[in-house]
Image (tube, rainbow, N blue to C red):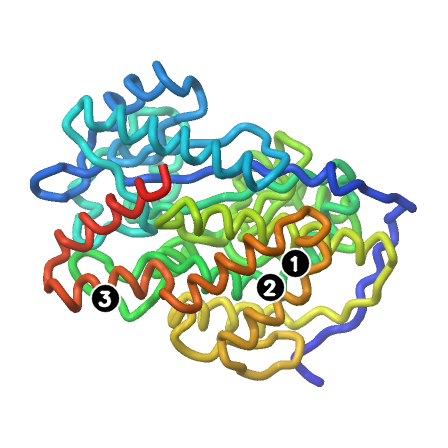
Amino acid sequence: MTFKNSLVTPTQLQPVSLSKDDFTIGVEEEYQIIHPETRELRSRGRSVLSKAQATVGDQVTQELYLSQIEIGTSVCHSLADVRGELQRLRSGIITAAKKVDCRIAAAGTHPFSNWEGQKLTPKERYQDLAADYKQLVWEQLIFGCHVHVGIPDREIAIQVMNRSRPWLASILALASNSPFWIGHDTGYSSYRTEIWGRWPTSGIPHVFASRSEYDKLVEDLIATGSISEASKIYWDMRPSSHYETLEYRVTDVCLTIDEAVMIAGLLRALARTCAQEAERYTEITHARPEVLQAAKWQAARYGLDAKLIDTQKGRPVAARTLIKALLEYVRPALEEFGDWKEINTRVRDVLTGGTGASRQREIFRKKGSLEDVVDFTTDEMARGI
């Protein structure tokens, strides 16, 4: 079939057997700082950071704009750990924001604040990005979730990245949470995905036969002046340049803690499943990058409200059917971690109650005000704390 390419053999893969305990989890979330009266974004990042660090330390950091704030969990060994960390960190940020007359929201885009009214964080890294990329940086008023999964074997991490590719669009659809942009309904469930996709080093990574092949690409990109170092590769997943993890970067920040735990659990189970297949040398025929990109666009456009693309069979299928296939694919790993019941329940909650994007739209349909949508995202941010 023309939508697939040939088998890639992991030529450098040595016999290895990772334990389930090797697959740790770390979650990073980017939040919106909100004016309590106007509901616009508010450039109080330094004040919120100062107050929050007094409580949660360096697990809270600045982001590109002063109207953004980011948290990162400690290394977690269970979904209970992830939940506890997110409860603690979200609570700490919300409390800190209240002290400086702000609120905190969790959505991939703000419903109506314009990027033109935002202040860049005065940090050399961000100033250099703005100088290099100009308009691309100025419009990056978006908020994502990154999940690090511990994989101590660097060759296995590359093979996990290869094998995770068919499922990224389904996970993006489940977590879609950015339907509005500068006062308009974009028609997308994850418009953040479209904004982020403008970066020259964003997108779905291609297949690598080995870690050395990946390292050679990084060297070539640095040598050509395309990037300054490996962390400037902004793919939907990438080997971390600082930790022994594979970093999944495909989703919007989740509205609720429940949804964030769901995404973290699914991604860890996906990584474990793919690692075991790589260890067994299970054959895989990789979908063409054009088909994967089409599947990602379909997920960003419609979320779970239309058919998704089964990249392995090369055809559209009902969203529920593909999500069920994802669950069945990773079920052995979920059961191994003791996560099956919780993740199955959380996924079904989303299938029944809607994604963050569809719930934001429902609030707007009922109340007719984007300010009410902001109130909804701040309320959902705090749910479960």
Which tag, 3 or 2, sits closer to the chain's start?
A: 2
Q: Quadrant of the C terminus?
A: top left
Along the horizontal axis of the image, is 283 left or right of 24? right
Q: Tell me where residue 189 sits by quadrant.
A: bottom left
Task: Name the residue furthest left.
Answer: 37
- Can you give x and y, in whole percent of width and height, for residue 75 in the image? 59, 30
Q: Which residue is mark 2?
A: 167
Residue at 79% of width from left, 55% of height from top?
Answer: 209
Element carrying mark 1: helix
Q: Quadrant of the N terminus?
A: bottom right
- Can you give x and y, in whole percent of width and height, for residue 216 in the image? 72, 44
- Looking at the picture, which amino acid does disc 2 mark? Trp
- How far is mark 3 from mark 2, CA to CA? 27 Å
Q: Which residue is mark 1?
A: 164
Residue at 44% of width from left, 48% of height from top?
Answer: 258
Which tag, 1 or 3, sits closer to the chain's start?
A: 1
Camera-nearest residue between 138 and 147: 147
- Looking at the picture, which amino acid does disc 1 mark? Ser
- Looking at the picture, which amino acid does disc 3 mark? Glu
- Can you give x and y, in whole percent of width and height, for residue 308 in the image? 50, 76
Q: Are marks 1 and 2 in contact (CB under 8 Å)?
A: yes
Residue 56 visible (yes or no):
yes
Camera-nearest residue between 147 and 77: 77
